[in-house]
Image: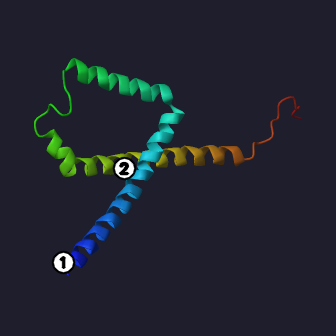
Amino acid sequence: MKVMRQLAEVRAAQARMTLARHDVGEPAAALLARGRAWPLTTVGLAAGAGVALGSLDVHPLRVPGLTSLVGGGLAEVLAQGAHLLAEVAAAGVAAHAAVDAAAATEPTPPTTEGASTP
């Protein structure tokens, strides 16, 4: 029955991967949407990071221990950070939209320009 137990473990791992993909998909989609909204900023940040890392002669796989960190859990931390960043950005956008909507629906007081006062 060892095969049945291994099959159950594989199915459980597949289910965890499906949930992890879904959890990472939301912030990734938000980051892609921001990239589409601000393409020059995205390219500028990527170019700046590349120039900075290139001038320091830093390659991710040349840093000792970084490969094991990426494989061991840093990817999960980065995914959570991206998720948090996307939530904060979405909250900011929602707040600005609410302020704009409230300003648009407020009735404007009548102006008294040109009216004579007795």
Name the amino acid, label 1. Answer: Lys
> Residue 86 appears at what percent x and percent y?
42, 47
Instruction: Say left or right for 89 vs 51.
Output: right
Could you say which is closer to the camera, residue 115 or residue 13? 13
Question: How many numbered discs, if any?
Answer: 2
Report which residue position mark 1 lands on: 2
> Residue 100 appears at what percent x and percent y?
62, 43
Question: Relative to 8, does residue 30 appear above or below in the rendering?
Answer: above
Quadrant assignment, res 4: bottom left
Judge the density around disc 1: few (<14), some (14-19), many (≥20) Cα neighbours within 10 Å.
few
* Discs 1/2, front: 1
Could you say which is closer to the camera, residue 118 or residue 39? 39
Quadrant assignment, res 20: bottom left
Question: Relative to 115, does residue 54 appear above or below in the rendering?
Answer: above
Report which residue position mark 2 lands on: 84
Instruction: Say left or right for 117 vs 66.
Output: right
Q: Residue at x 59, y 45 (%)?
A: 97
Dot 1 or dot 2, earlier in sequence: 1
